[in-house]
Image (cartoon, rainbow, N blue to C red):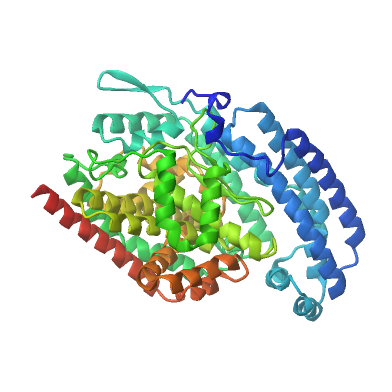
Amino acid sequence: MTTLRSEVNIEETWDLSPLFENDTAFYSYLKETVSKVHAFSEQYKGTLNNSETVEAMLDDYAAITEAIDRLGNYASLNLSVDQTDAEAQKLIGQFGTAYDEMASALSFIDSELLALEADQLEDIKNHSQHYQRYLEKLVRRKPHQLHPEVEKALAAFSSTFSAPYGLYDTTKMLDIDFGTFEAHGKEIPMNYVSFEGELEVDGDTEIRRNAFRKFSDTLKKYENTTAKTYNMTVQQEKTESRLRGYDSVIDFLLERQEVSRELYNRQIDLITTELAPHMRRYAKLLQKTNHLDDMKFEDLKISLDETYEPEITVAESQDYITKALSIMGDDYMQLVDDAYSKRYIDFVQNKGKSTGAFCASPYSTNPFILISWTSKMTEVFVLAHELGHAGHFHLANHHQNIFDAESSLYFVEAPSTMNEMLMANYLLKESDDPKFRRWVIATIISRTYYHNFVTHLLEAAYQREVYNQVDAGEQLSAPLLNRIKKQVISDFWGDAVEITEGAELTWMRQPHYYMGLYPYTYSAGLTIATLMAKRINEEGQSAVNDWIEVLKAGGSKPPVELAKMAGIDLTTDAPLKETIAYIGSLVDELEKLTEEIDA
């Protein structure tokens, strides 16, 4: 990709002016916010010993948090669309320095509250008008709170602790040069975005496999640096978990998600064992329909039918999205319409842009969605997914205070993947054509379930073993990480897929490892989404009403309680088993449709 950010069509980029008109306004607001933080600290430090003062403090703290949230989003969103931009790099650096200063100055809040006697803190919580949930979470943290000066020091190192992720991203997006690879006698240029967006799903076997070879061989040159960078993150997590008195890094990371070890392990173990047979059948079907002599790891993301791959424009995608999600109601659909008309979405491909897709939702403004549009029909699923995040955060931000708006990571992927299911249900109702129906179902499996249930689940199984090694005192190295990753994917795919050399390096591609125990939450969210989409399909408006209330609840309840609001009991393995059985039924349907088409 050689297109520069300065050369793209501005109408296909997002408009960040709701955050700040320009960088000058950002810097002015940053300076003002730092001053407000210090004034806030002087006003409240040493006074947090009664419910009236604490309530007033939290009102002011909410406003400061909103300001910091706004600043942080502007800085990170600017960089995400062009990491080669020196001004964007300066912006994020200035924010990081200021953030450390502000976090250190604000650390007294939790320290003072947690220094109170348990009965006194409980009384303040019970008398709070707006912040009971915030204080409830604080009470749970009390056994793990450190001395105020230690907490202040840790807060001051916030940007330092997040530096490994920045280093990983810089190496990935700026330093690695994939050059070209040869296929059919031609030299084909490649970079991260073109490989992940196009070449690894290319229907031409020689192009796809040669691209994978060059991609993996290039990654291999950076494996030691990337392993060292990743090790910095997990060792930091281990040190903090030990300081805070947790038995393991996993327990430390699960605490903030309000999820038990039982739920975490069940999610990984049950899917790994019970989903594998269905996905091996799917791999064999891919091999058959694509006439492959052997099924390799780098073939797993190809289309079931390369000759049938609909294309779509950005304008056409809005029509599909509107029709598929219209059941969600007028308020929800107004956000979808605004996302297109008011430039909430960054569609373009340009040099230096972050890979993948994401949705950022500043508390005080509209959401922002990043995607690199390839014109493939599968993009409507990606966009429906990100609009699911946007709708969720938009509703939560409007109905909860800033501390209660963000739900647990365990739940956060449910609204996004639910929208993918609504898109699939709409498309299946629209056509009886066997080839189109097969494409839709294959897309559900490859885009929704393979990506979220398999890819991220195998990341989670790998990640769990990494943390077990770290808890046992190991330092991470490239050979160790390669061995763990290869074992995980080999166990899952068995004899159905040949694990090509280089497949073990897929741990190098995933930024989620720098975000705590994130990967397993995709399958958790998709389990909730599958059952919720089934309810909406069967019950209609009453189920939609329940779901809207769940979205409005944001993070005001733990994830198990949010699921219960949707009529789903996560304390048993029934939802997981039902979801896995559904995936099995989709593979059954694919096999039948393939026989019908081939007949």
- Image location (x, y in percent) of residue 486: 36, 47
Q: Who's the residue at 38% across and 55% down the image?
A: 423
- Image location (x, y in percent) of residue 582: 30, 65
User: In the image, 100: left or right of 460?
Assistant: right
Question: Is 125 placed above or below 431 here?
Answer: below
In the picture, residue 232 is in which quadrant? top right
Q: Who's the residue at 44% across and 37% down the image?
A: 373
Q: Nearer the viewer, residue 151 or 314?
A: 314
- Image location (x, y in percent) of residue 66: 73, 54
Q: Who's the residue at 51% across and 56% down the image?
A: 333
- Asked if residue 501 shows in the view, the reply is no
Question: Is 411 placed above or below 37 here?
Answer: below
- Asked if residue 535 shows in the view, the reply is yes
Q: In the displayed image of the protein, which residue is found farthest to the left?
A: 599
User: In the image, 7: left or right of 43?
Assistant: left
> What is the total number of numbered labels drawn onto the structure image?
0
Question: Is 485 placed above or below 560 here?
Answer: above
- Image location (x, y in percent) of residue 126: 75, 79
Q: Who's the residue at 21% across and 59% down the image?
A: 589
